[in-house]
Amino acid sequence: MSRSQARRRVAFIGLALVLLGLTGVSVVGTVATRHVATSARTAAWLAEVYHHAHEATASEEIFKLQYRIEPERHARVDHADAAASLEASLRDIDAHGSAHDRAVVAKLRSLHKQYLAAAERFFSAVDRADPVQIRRVAADDIDPLESQLGSMLHDAEEEQDAAAGEASDRLDRVERLVFVATLSSFAVGLGMIVVFTLVATGYQRRLVRQAMHDELTGLPNRSVFLARTAEALDGAPSVLMLDLDRFKEVNDTLGHQYGDELLRQVSARTTAAVRTADTVARLAGDEFAILLPATGAADAARLAERVQAELHRSFDLGDVTVDIEVSIGVASAPQDSGSADELVRCADIAMYTAKDTKAGVLAYQPEMRTEDSSRLLLLGDLRRALEVEDQISLHYQPKVSLADGAVCGLEALVRWRHPVRGQIAPADFIPVAETTGLINRLTLYVLRHALAQSRAWLDAGRELPVAVNLSPRCLLDPGLVDDVTRLLAEHRVPAGRLRLEVTESAVMANPAQATATLRQLHDLGVRLSIDDYGTGYSSMAYLKQLPVDELKIDRTFVLHMDTDHDDVVLVRGAVELGHNLGMTVVAEGVEAAAHADALRALGCDIAQGYHYARPMTAPDLEHWLQAKVLSFL
């Protein structure tokens, strides 16, 4: 064998050894990376499941308190559903967790079994109206168990979040080791080292990204967001929590593929609206979070408004264009909290308050923490108010024909005078009632009294139709049609003298069921109306199928008709749409003669607002009708 051949042989053997070494490094690095990435994903998933279990125990506590204040069956059912949700989370942890997690689950189940037994004793004491037993069971049995369950679930969630962070650090170390080993092996064959480095490094980075980012949007997930928030605490950051309003309607009406595309576009717009140093994350479902390092409360609020403006522009989802709204909560360190978890929690509380009040953007305030208990107390007071006759009353606002000034109907509006707090605005108690079955009782109360008054007017020779508003929850109540039928017969009021008003959003919450209910009411002879038209998310396909005969234009489009040409265009479109669909068109919020003149010129049929009369009691309305003059038309 010649020397050159020997050299080639040595070079070949050396190259083969390099290839074998690179292959070994790649295999070992890939196996190690996959193992650590799997650990990171599992820890992040377990942290989320522990979080859901913790929320279930909190829900049990809320529904237990609600039953104490308002002992109705739905609170017991909701309490049982929360217990089932907790058990489902524990089954998931038991199936996929470690031996330690299974031991934690066993202890949690034992504590929860004791809690459920104590809860039964508590409910029994409430049913017996035994305050001594209620306080004893709550203080001696339930409160310690709730505290133990909450503490164990919180500790387990933090432990899994920490494990996910440690796994991420191990991934970084493995990547560095593989990189160094690969460079050393490539001292003999530079060409091969480039190939293997790219393959190994690229694969590892994909695994890291999959473990720490949301698959649909590519944004960081909850674990990464909390870790970055903790790192930014020394710089006094702010956190924004975002939740899309009516996202469920997009999913239910158009399909999940449209919902997914909407989430991707929301992710892109939100990321584009913030600064390079900010972090946008998707926490779950349609809930997003933004970390603003070294940003005070005032700047955070301004940035939140900028994000809101971006998301309130229409979204093109291919063959469909949709509009959504967003609720944003703002919390800032250190004034709101000095820990990452608590800062996110404060922003979450502010976000849900903004969602409930339709405020759009709200900064966290300490009194928001007491809102849940205040709502429960308000629910209890409202339930008791419905059992007496001197707190809840009805006021009536006339609806006036624009053609001749004649009164052609009335809208019944509920009012509540609390014996201690005085007059409570409908905007304060109706949304609270709508979160429970109490809205159904309130609606029946209004229907009963409105029909009784209608009977009195008929007996006096006044044939004025009376309108009553229906909430989305009432529209989906399977007993609504029977209740309306019974009350009409009880008060001997012709069905055509009753008008029921529903909003666009009430119909779109469940279009098929809502349409079926409206058809039954229409067949009964009840007149139907779409209220607040223009403010909701509606489908023309559904609108033209609804058996309604009246379209009410929302007051927000009427108030500035005399100064805003765009509002005039919108009102004209609504009037033409209503007439083309065979409906009578009513304009709400008519507060000046200029409004009435403009509406009359557009062909609107009926007006309602302070220009004619404010809502008033039945006796005051009788005086108004007797003294009415039509000089202001």
Image (cartoon, rainbow, N blue to C red):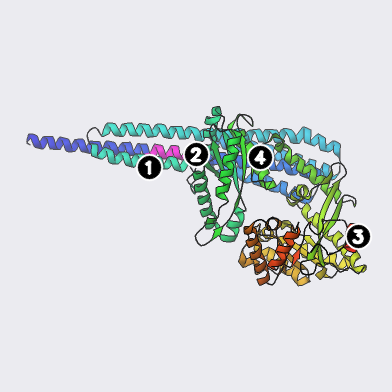
First in sequence: mark 3 vs mark 1: 1
Percent position (x, y) of residue 26?
Answer: 33, 38
First in sequence: mark 2 vs mark 3: 2
First in sequence: mark 2 vs mark 4: 2
Extent of the magenta region: 30-39
Tag 3 and tag 1, C-beta contact below 8 Å: no
Q: Is residue 295 left or right of residue 403?
A: left
Q: Of the numbered discs in the image, which one, if any, rests on residue 623?
A: 3
**146 shown above or below 262:** above
Of discs 4 and 1, which sits in the foreground?
Answer: 4
First in sequence: mark 3 vs mark 4: 4
Residue density around tag 3, few if under 14, some if 14–19, many if 20 or more, within 10 Å = few
- Name the dominant secondary structure of the magenta segment: helix
Q: Which residue is mark 2?
A: 275
Tag 2 and tag 3, C-beta contact below 8 Å: no
Which amino acid type is marked by label 1? Tyr
**Camera sees residue 103:** no
The secondary structure type at the circle numbered 2 is loop
Tag 2 and tag 4, C-beta contact below 8 Å: no
Q: Of the numbered discs in the image, which one, if any, rests on residue 349?
A: 4
Percent position (x, y) of residue 198?
Answer: 32, 41
Percent position (x, y) of residue 325?
Answer: 61, 51
Residue farthest left in this picture? 2
First in sequence: mark 1 vs mark 2: 1
**541 shown above or below 99:** below
Q: Quadrant location of the C terminus? A: bottom right
Percent position (x, y) of residue 337?
Answer: 63, 31
First in sequence: mark 4 vs mark 1: 1
